[in-house]
Image (cartoon, helix red, strand yellow):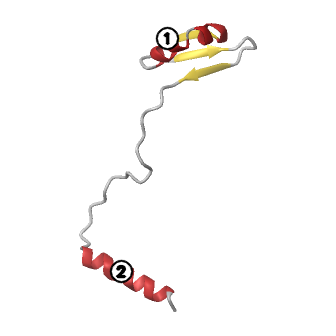
Amino acid sequence: MKVYSYSQARQNLSAVLNRAKTEQVLIRRRGGETFSVVPRRPGGSPFDVPGVKTRATTSDILSALREVRSRHSD
């Protein structure tokens, strides 16, 4: 783990970010507050979810949708 002062981190930001890719990096302010620098992993769409295994057929799903919609149209 590497600890940088605020001034060191500001002057060497590129090096701080590169180091944070491989190890924990902390930045300490003069008043003693400490912050962790963590790389953010690339994320996908919030709709990119794993599939679910089921025995339901397309026909079963469409039938269930029709049933629900008919209940709410009244």
What percent of the width, then of the height, locates residue 35?
Answer: 62, 21
Relative to residue 58, is residue 14 drawn left or right? Answer: right
Q: Is residue 36 visible?
A: yes
The percent position of residue 70, horizontal first and vertical second, equals 44, 88
In the rendered image, the vertical position of residue 42 relative to residue 48, given as above or below = above
Residue drawn at point x = 50 percent, y = 17 percent: 17
Give the numbered dot on residue 64.
Answer: 2
Q: Amino acid at mark 2?
A: Ala
Q: Residue at 23% of width from left, 69% of height from top?
A: 55
Q: Measured along the vertical axis of the image, is residue 15 above or below residue 68?
A: above
Q: In the picture shown, does residue 13 fall above or below 57? A: above
Q: Distance of mark 2 from mark 1, alpha carbons?
A: 57 Å
Residue at numbered disc 1: 15
Q: Nearer the viewer, mark 2 or mark 1?
A: 1
> Does residue 1 appear in this view?
no
- Do labels 2 and 1 touch, CB within 8 Å? no
Task: Name the residue rendered at 43%, 20% in the picture.
Answer: 21
The amino acid marked with disc number 1 is: Ala
Residue 25 picture location, percent across and down: 53, 16
